[in-house]
Image: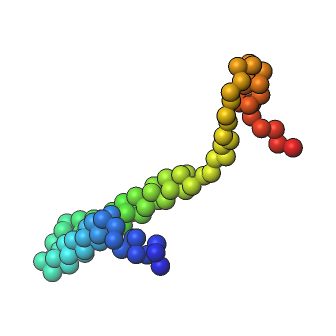
């Protein structure tokens, strides 16, 4: 439900909806005036608005999935000036 609410409040969604409705309106006007060029342009704009919205959402979802990766870090406190001790603290952990 939260995902639907986010999509309905998205500016991308409303711009795509407005472009879709404008394309449909252009197509209807083209049919009403028997203007084939206007009808075709309206249909193309309708399809493009949907395709661009889908591509934008896919891009955002891809970036979101990439940012959800978790990284394990370790906290190191070194007070030693002994080089071997410091290097051992910074060495990657061995999986066993």
**Residue pictured at 20% horizontal, 76% vertical:** 25
Q: Is residue 24 left or right of residue 10?
A: left
Which color scheme is applied?
Answer: rainbow
Compared to 87, does 30 lie above or below? Answer: below
User: Which image quarter: residue 85?
Assistant: top right
**Residue pictured at 29% horizontal, 69% vertical:** 14
Residue 28, horizontal then vertical, whole percent: 20, 78
Residue 33, horizontal then vertical, whole percent: 12, 77
**Residue pictured at 33% horizontal, 71% vertical:** 9
Q: Which of the two residues, 27 or 60, is positioned nearer the viewer here?
A: 60
Most distant residue in the right direction: 96
Q: Which of the two residues, 1 or 42, is positioned nearer the viewer here?
A: 1
User: Which image quarter: residue 44?
Assistant: bottom left
Residue 2 seen in render = yes
Q: Is residue 22 left or right of residue 11?
A: left
Residue 12, horizontal then vertical, whole percent: 33, 63
């Amino acid at each position: 439900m939260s995902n639907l609410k986010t999509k309905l409040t998205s500016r991308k969604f409303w711009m795509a909806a407005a472009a879709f409705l404008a394309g449909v309106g252009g197509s209807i006007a083209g049919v009403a005036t028997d203007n084939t060029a206007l009808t075709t342009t309206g249909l193309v704009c309708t399809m493009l608005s949907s395709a661009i919205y889908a591509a934008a959402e896919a891009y955002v979802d891809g970036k979101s999935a990439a940012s959800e990766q978790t990284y394990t870090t370790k906290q190191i406190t070194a007070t030693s000036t002994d080089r071997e001790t410091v290097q051992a603290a910074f060495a990657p952990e061995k999986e066993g």
